[in-house]
Image (cartoon, rainbow, N blue to C red):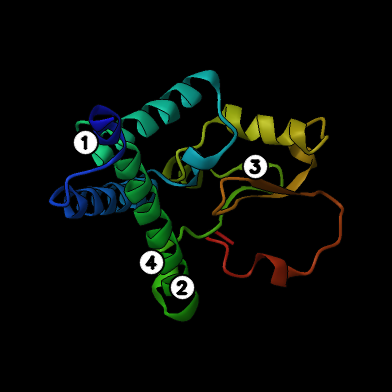
Amino acid sequence: MERFLEELLIEPWRIPVIIATATGIYLGFMLLAKLFGSRVLMAMTASDAVVVIMFGAVAGRVIIGHPPTLVAGLIGLATLMVLEAAFGMLRRFTGWGRVLSRRPVLVVSEGQMLVDAMRSAHLSRTDVYTAVRRAGLASLEQVQAMVLEPTGTMSVIRTGQPFDPVVLRGVDGY
């Protein structure tokens, strides 16, 4: 019974360590996502999925520490959820939302790829062509505007489709 409880419980001195490492991993991931752009949030290839799984494995191991226990895992998860809620409120009620979140980026305009914008957003030509196909279009020339959204999705406005320019207000490159 004692061994069973050891596997579930945690020494009290480890609690602040877990909270600190979870906070560090969270902030580090936020910084890396900001640096590498919304591209990391797009639909994943097989290699992207492997990298995301490895991120999770490394982050989980760092947060929970050794030996991993149920309580350590719960403390780590709770810390990550509290951080996400706190940063969500910070984005909503302060100007930090513009600093923490990426802005949408215009990557195609009037059928032309905007190479500098694509480079800064870490997008390849293949990413753009994939978005064209997903939009049900047969060619890049059918794209009036394509925007990489902060969520990692690509929004496509078809050529000839009327739209209110207000829709693109706040989009980098418009």
Q: Which element type, helix, strand or loop, lies under badge 2? A: helix
Q: Which element type, helix, strand or loop, lies under badge 1? A: loop
Q: Amino acid at mark 1?
A: Gly
Q: Which mark is residue 89?
A: 2
Q: Earlier in the sequence, mark 1 or mark 3?
A: 1
Which quarter shows the C terminus?
bottom right
- Residue with the mark numbered 1: 65
- Residue 78, percent across and down? 39, 54
- Residue with the mark numbered 3: 112
Inter-mark Cα distance, 4 to 2: 14 Å
Left or right placement of residue 83 versus residue 12 in this view? right
Q: Which element type, helix, strand or loop, lies under badge 4? A: helix
Q: Residue furthest front?
A: 1
Q: Are marks 4 and 2 in contact (CB under 8 Å)?
A: no
Q: Earlier in the sequence, mark 2 or mark 1?
A: 1
- Residue 47, percent across and down? 47, 20
* Picture quadrant where residue 101 is located: bottom left
Inter-mark Cα distance, 4 to 3: 29 Å
- In this rendering, which labeled residue sits more in front, label 4 or label 2? 2
Left or right placement of residue 138 versus residue 37 in this view? right
- Residue with the mark numbered 4: 99
Q: Amino acid at mark 2?
A: Met
Other residues around mark 2 within 10 Å, as few (<14) / some (14–19) / many (≥20): few
Q: Earlier in the sequence, mark 4 or mark 3?
A: 4
Q: Compared to 49, does 150 lie above or below?
A: below
Q: Which residue occupies the foreground of this view, 102 or 56? A: 56
* Picture quadrant where residue 126 is located: top right
- Residue 22, percent across and down? 28, 49
- In this rendering, which labeled residue sits more in front, label 1 or label 3? 1
Inter-mark Cα distance, 2 to 3: 38 Å
Q: Amino acid at mark 3?
A: Gln
Q: Are marks 4 and 3 in contact (CB under 8 Å)?
A: no
